[in-house]
Amino acid sequence: MTLYGEVTRRKTNVSEQKATEARNHRTMNLDSMSTGEILRVMNEEDKTVPDAVNKELNQIEKTARAVIDSFNKGGKLVYVGAGTSGRLGVLDAAECPPTFGTDPDKVQSLIAGGEAAMTESIEGAEDDPEQAKADLIEINLNENDTVIALAASGQTPYCIGGLEYSNAVGANTAAISCNKNSKISEYADIPIEIEVGPEILTGSTRLKAGTAQKLALNMISTSSMIGIGKVFQNLMVDVQPTNEKLKKRAKDIVARAAETDEKTASIYLERAHQQPKIAIIMLTLNCSYEEAQTHLTESNGFVREAIKLVDKESARLE
């Protein structure tokens, strides 16, 4: 079993109606409301989602720590989901390389039905637990990885199959659902159950449930990237300047972090071979490219620590 606790096997009462499928009494006359009334009630219901997420912060933190542990061991983060939940996982994974400069293999997402399921419904795909196992085998899942299953209902067979295989190989496992006592929670080291209550449109979990899952994914991926040195202050210092927009952003990041002008930042970015972290260290410590590389390596990729280490050494020599 993994470092983050034993998998629980809690009994669920299948006769209980899931909150995600219950009817919202505030919208029983949804079809007779004006457009303005519909929008107002949607907005009011959406305001409740952050509070529901807040109740699961401890579990979200445990999950982020598990992901950081995986990254530090050379492992990866893998999302496993179906339908809207699966698409949210794909979206979060796709945003990591441009935001944090990660290899595409670092954060991956598997969706029931494969790539085609991103734009259309693949009937029956989510009911196949064996396919999830096959998909995880294909990406060489191992004990250094963390797998997060995503299912608003909390009972998707594809997700359960993925968690079963992940547990078998010794990977860290977490599950994000929007119902209490969810089935997938029984198979996860870290169950995250964000109960947002009935949707305004009964069973349409792309609404509040989707928002809740997106918020949780934002928290997990962002905090875990910060945890491995991808951020300095509140700046994306590992952004890869692969297009004009990102080149301008990288220059702006270096200028802000090193408290210099954009022209100087641009010059040092060139000297640093378009690596914002290296450019910031070169400017801040007035050192060469090679020295900046050494400082960053010694600090395990954390810019703040690299600067601190040199400051401490300078103070010691004085």
Image: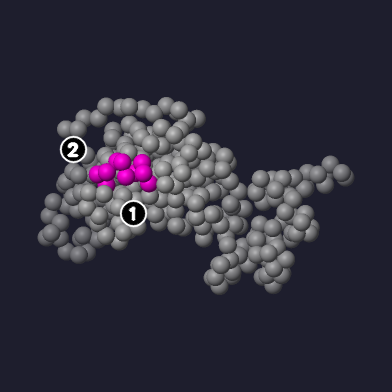
Residues in magenta?
A: 126-135
Circle 1 residue = 114
Dividing the image into 4 quarters, which one contains the C terminus?
top right
Which mark, residue 165? none
Q: Which residue is more in the foreground, 253 or 71? A: 71
Q: Position of residue 13 (x, y in %)?
A: 21, 30
Is 260 displayed left or right of 189 in the figure? Answer: right
Mark 2 crowdedness (10 Å alpha carbons): few <14, some 14-19, many ≥20: few
Does residue 93 sit above or below 247 in this rendering?
A: above
Is 131 one of the magenta-colored residues? yes
The answer to which of 313 and 269 lies nearer the viewer is 269
- Res. 288 image quadrant: bottom right
Amino acid type for the residue under numbered disc 1: Gly
Instruction: Between residue 101 and residue 195, name the one nearer to us.
Output: 101
Q: Secondary structure at mark 1?
A: loop
Residue type (three-letter) at the residue carrying disc 2: Gln
Closer mark to the observer between disc 1 and disc 2: 1
SS state under label 2 = loop
Q: Which residue is mark 2?
A: 17
Residue 56 in which image quadrant:
top left
Q: Name the foreground residue: 18 vs 168.
A: 168
